[in-house]
Structures are given as C-alpha cells and as structure tokens.
C-alpha cells in the first residue's frame, strides 16, 4: 500500500515514548487526577496514556472535551465547542491531552474551559508540539517536538483519513 503516509514515528517508538512520559507524569508532586482528552484527535494517545498511568498506579478519571477547529480543512478555522468539561474537574489536577499542538489555540481554549469548570490546575500533554514561533501556547509535555510536516495517524487525521494508523505519519501537501 504505497499510498499510505510516510512513517515518522513507528508504533513501537510511540509506545516507548509514552512509557517514558508516564514515568515523569506519575512522579509529579500534584499527580493528575483527571485526564481530559480533546476529541477527536487525542483519543488514541489518551487511551494509551491513561492505561500506562494505571500501570504506574495513577488511576485517572476521564472528562472528554470536544472542540473542532479544522473540520475538513488542513488549516484552522473558527473553533466550535461541541462538549465542554463538567464539574467533574472541580478542584482536581487535570491532564489536558491533545494530539498535536500546532498554533496552540485549541490548548488555550481547552485550558480556559477546564479552569472555568473549576480545575485546580491544568497540565498539557500532546503527542506532537510543533513549536511554531508564532504559537500562542506550548505544551508542558510532548512525545515529539519540532515536527514541521502535516501529520496523521495515531488519532490524527487529514479530512477524516488515516486516523486509525498505528503510527504517526506525514502527508505530502
């Protein structure tokens, strides 16, 4: 299947990075109590992360946040809040999980929603932080940084395609 995106990070490499990250997160003084994945792009990463945290003895509640900023485009557009966090996060240390931090608008919006819902603190973790110079936010933790390509797989998509790939790949634009 030569039409599939080129592999940037294999499933095995991702699993190793998740295991390393979880050691760091499990050692935080204010351990996360609630995982807040941003749907839809973070669901695969979040599933791996919360299960790995449980293996480290940190059992997280889950509060889904559903924001949409891309739709079927490759560039961000107006952001819609499809599902905001509930009071389940009130007084809790929240781990905000997203697939990719491009310009940071989604992370900023999700953090505000969580704080408005009463979270005690919010730490952000992403699979990819692109580290754009003009980004409005930076992740607290990232599996990979500085990726310049348009990426897919591991929950992230290109107008609905490639979300189920077990690796992170790049799409030629």
Image: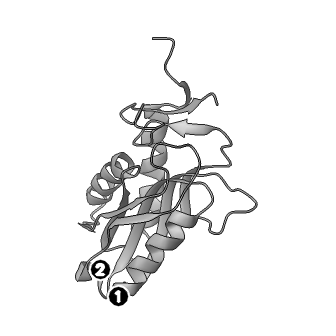
First in sequence, mark 2 or 1: give its number: 2
Q: How many marks?
A: 2
Q: State yes or no: discs 2 and 1 in contact (Cβ < 8 Å).
A: yes
Q: Residues within 10 Å of mark 1 (few under 14, many from 20)?
A: some
Question: Can residue 46 be seen?
Answer: yes
Q: Is residue 74 left or right of residue 96?
A: right
Residue 33 position in % (x across, y down): 30, 74
Choose between 139 and 74: the one closer to the eye.
74
> Which residue is label 2 attached to?
89
- Residue drawn at x 65%, y 69% is 136
> Which residue is label 1 attached to?
118
- Residue drawn at x 44%, y 71% is 110
Q: Is residue 155 above or below residue 114?
A: above
Q: Is residue 60 above or below residue 87?
A: above
Question: Can residue 28 be seen?
Answer: no
Choose between 165 and 78: the one closer to the eye.
78
Residue 7 position in % (x across, y down): 54, 27
- Residue drawn at x 56%, y 43% is 74
């Amino acid at each position: 299947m030569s039409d599939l995106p080129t592999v940037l990070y294999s499933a095995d490499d991702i699993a190793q990075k998740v295991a390393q990250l979880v050691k760091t997160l499990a050692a935080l003084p204010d351990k996360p109590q609630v995982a807040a994945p941003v749907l839809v792009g973070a669901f695969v990463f979040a599933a791996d992360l919360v299960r790995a945290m449980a293996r480290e003895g940190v059992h997280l509640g889950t509060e889904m946040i559903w924001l949409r900023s891309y739709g079927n485009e490759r560039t961000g557009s107006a952001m819609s809040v499809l599902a905001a966090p509930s009071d389940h996060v009130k007084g809790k240390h929240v781990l905000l999980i997203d697939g990719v931090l491009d310009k940071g608008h989604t992370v900023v919006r999700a953090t505000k929603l969580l704080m408005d819902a009463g979270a005690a603190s919010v730490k952000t973790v992403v699979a990819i932080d692109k580290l754009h110079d003009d980004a409005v936010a930076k992740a607290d933790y990232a599996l990979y940084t500085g990726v310049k390509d348009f990426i897919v797989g591991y929950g992230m998509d290109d107008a609905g395609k490639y979300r189920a790939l077990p690796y992170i790949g790049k799409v030629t634009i």
